[in-house]
Image: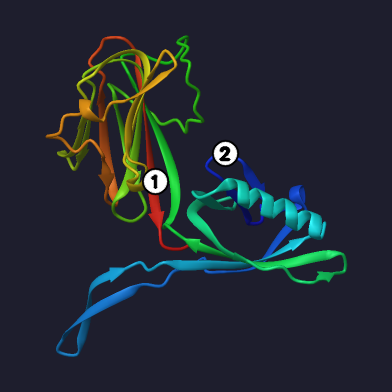
Amino acid sequence: MIRQFYIENKYGDTYYFNYKNQTHISQVSGLGFALDSKYLEYHNLFSRSEYKIPLSEITTTLVFLKGYIGYKAFVDFISKSGDDLKLYYQTDAFKAYCFVDVASLTKAELISGTLQSTIVFKKLSLWLREKTYEIIANGTATGKVYPYIYPYHYSSSYEGKTFIINDGLDDAPVVIEMLGDVIDPEVIVKKSGEIVATLRLYITADNASIVVNAIPSKQLMTKEESGIVTDIYGLQDFETDNFIFLGHGNYEFEFKPGVATETICKVTVLEGYLGI
């Protein structure tokens, strides 16, 4: 597969830069990174003391094979999407996205029936790669039907535990979803045998979907039960971490649903990368 770009809005609508939409993408710049760094000097040797990741831009040329009709369709997509756009980059070996905002879109003259425009995206995050794990507590998923369907990337688990690797930078936010019955559920995170983070909720639910999302711009705690979604932020144990972030490295996750029946815990880690 050659590299592929597409954007997705907060409603799940997708616009592909390929023959499907008669829109080609070329001359992409800004996929790498630049750091604002400070250095300390030690007798003619320098050591980086800190760095910041500044707001940067991704610039590319769009070629609309349908001319103005194609250009207008793309403008309509952007206009209806609002904020919270994701720009995806995908190859056979790697798939990642970053949050972007459209800073500008120019319109050029028609050239041989096509219209070429330059678009500038403000890059609002690192390149993010989602890795999803599943923990099955008290049984196997065979024969049990849940009203919630997710595109799992399955991992082996035993006794309510699984092992998770963050290959990206530090402070990768974690999204935790619990499916099934729970009584005061708990998630314990260990590194090298020591507890480094804990999630604990004071809640009883039957066949529910509970979500604890640590992504800074989207932090929430909700419960969906019998089709009704409620905020459960006030039901957390405020003496534990609850919103979990992982540094680079290997971790053991243990899920304790508090019940003897089968319950599933889905763990999604957003690994961050400076460039792709």
Vertical comparison of 33 with 240: above or below: below
Give left or right: position of 271 versus 160. Answer: right
Type of residue at label 1? Leu
Q: Which residue is drawn at 74% across and 67% down?
A: 116
Let me know if residue 71 appears in the view. yes
Specify the farthest residue to the right. Answer: 112
Let me know if residue 17 appears in the view. no
Tell me the residue that label 1 is attached to. 270
Vertical comparison of 141 with 67: above or below: above
Front-most of 12 and 251? 12
Please, what secondary structure does the residue beneath circle 2 have? loop
Residue 161 percent across, percent down from the top left: 28, 28
Vertical comparison of 165 with 69: above or below: above
Type of residue at label 2? Gly
Give left or right: position of 68 versus 93. Answer: right
Residue 5 picture quarter: bottom right
Q: Dot 1, how many residues are within 10 Å of its Cα: few (below 14), some (14-19), or many (20+)?
A: many
Q: Residue at x 20, y 85 (%)?
A: 45
Residue 273 percent across, percent down from the top left: 41, 58
Q: Mark on residue 12?
A: 2
Type of colouring:
rainbow
Residue 245 percent across, percent down from the top left: 27, 45
Please, what secondary structure does the residue beneath circle 1 have? strand
Q: Dot 2, how many residues are within 10 Å of its Cα: few (below 14), some (14-19), or many (20+)?
A: few
Front-most of 12 and 188? 12
Q: Residue at x 47, y 9 (%)?
A: 143
Q: Which of the two labelled residues, at mark 1 and mark 2, occupies the earlier sequence position?
A: 2
Q: Are marks 1 and 2 in contact (CB under 8 Å)?
A: no
Q: Mark on residue 222?
A: none
